[in-house]
Image: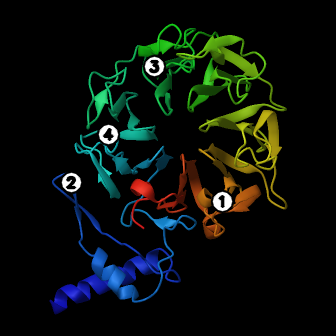
Amino acid sequence: MVRAATWLSALVRSCENRFGGRSPVTMCVTLNRVAGSVVVGVMTVVAHASLGAQRPVCGTRTTAACTAPGLTFQTISAGFAHSCGVTPEGVAYCWGDGRKGALGNGRRQVSRLPQRVVGQYAFVEVGAGGDFTCARTADSQVLCWGGERPVPGWPEVSDVPRAVVLDKPAAAMAVGRRHVCTLDREGSAYCWGWNVDGETGVGTSGIDAAMVATPTPVDTDARFKNLSAGLGFTCGVTLEGTVRCWGTNIDRIVGEQATDRCGEITPIPCATRPVAVPIPELASTVSAGTSHVCVLTVSGRVFCWGSNGSGQVGAYGPGVPSVPVPSEVTIKRQGPFLTVSSGGVHSCALTTSRRVYCWGAYDFAGNDQAGAEALAPTLAAGGTQFRAISAGQLHACGLDTKGRVLCWGDTINGALGVR
């Protein structure tokens, strides 16, 4: 008993030191690979006891969580209510709401502990969607798992990865709330899944067919260098640096060229094929949120548009319900942006100083002012330096400069991981 207590105390101190000794640790686990699985050191109760009467501040709605001690990642993705990452070895882990199989561990459960996705795959990227997940391998395959019904593109509802049959190898992938898109090596786009709002871009919508059963070419001559899929829409940056979007226009995402009608019952404006969205300068990457979009330009500027109920577009206060044209987001006395990520009711961007700034609903921006909105980009996660950021529906996750995961925002269903 004494030896065990000494070991647990040392482990608590190790985690406190590793993730900032100034803040007490609410949970800390060690992860060891045994026969391809993860063994979790049982120490949650002891860790809490070691804090005494202190109130935990790691992983609240407004402070970053110590998500996965012992693991480092090269990519990260925050989804609707779960998160996933890929390690430098190509192993995928997921945590959060896996009640519909989104964690890929063969079980339907909610887990705050990172669960290793089963199978011997060499993943290079992962995308956490609504209630499912997809990942791309080093040999350009796409595998998906989870969902409440058989999702087009893989043969059955599965709690473990199933390969998607592609016409051409996938050079890139975009996972939305209910649909998925890929790019081949020439930049041609293919989409499948839910299509009520024309989000697959194949020229039809829910009025014709609510689902696109297999990866289908997007109806355009454009070639893309990257794509991003949101809720009911998709956007991409072409090889020439222009932006095109397709799908629902209910939040004025697609713009004046959305002349089609989509929907299952009541027709709504949409574009069933990609249409151009004017941007003040050439675009580098695009990020589609739940109902808004942000674009990073080649000079490091960020422009956002769409739904703005919580100020997630950034250029206006939350009193402006939607912003129909791309509007610039700026930070005083800060350099250009390196990347931007659009979430549900917030957006986050990484600057050249490696700091993350978020705007929109404060609860999900990694600040200490829950219940308000950030009308301008505000420093998140205590100024930690990051190399990657991903905004989910009600949370965000980032990789620090050592590849460690920090998450903040809504704590329900474990999307933040260990906290």
For marks 4 and 1, the one nearer the N-term is 4
Label 2: state its secondary structure.
Answer: strand
Q: Position of residue 353 (x, y in %)?
A: 70, 61
Q: Residue at x 73, y 22 (%)?
A: 240
Q: Position of residue 241 (x, y in %)?
A: 73, 27
Label 3: state its secondary structure.
Answer: strand
Answer whether residue 10 is visible to the viewer in this image.
Answer: yes
Q: Amino acid at mark 1?
A: Tyr
For marks 2 and 3, the one nearer the N-term is 2
Q: Position of residue 402 (x, y in %)?
A: 50, 63
Cα gap from disc 3 to disc 1, whole angstroms: 34 Å
Pointer 3 with pointer 1, Cβ within 8 A? no
Which residue in the structure is indicated by mark 4? 100
Which numbered disc covers residue 362?
A: 1
Q: Is residue 316 left or right of residue 292?
A: right
For marks 2 and 4, the one nearer the N-term is 2
Q: Residues within 10 Å of mark 3 (few under 14, many from 20)?
A: many
Q: Amino acid at mark 4?
A: Lys
For marks 3 and 1, the one nearer the N-term is 3
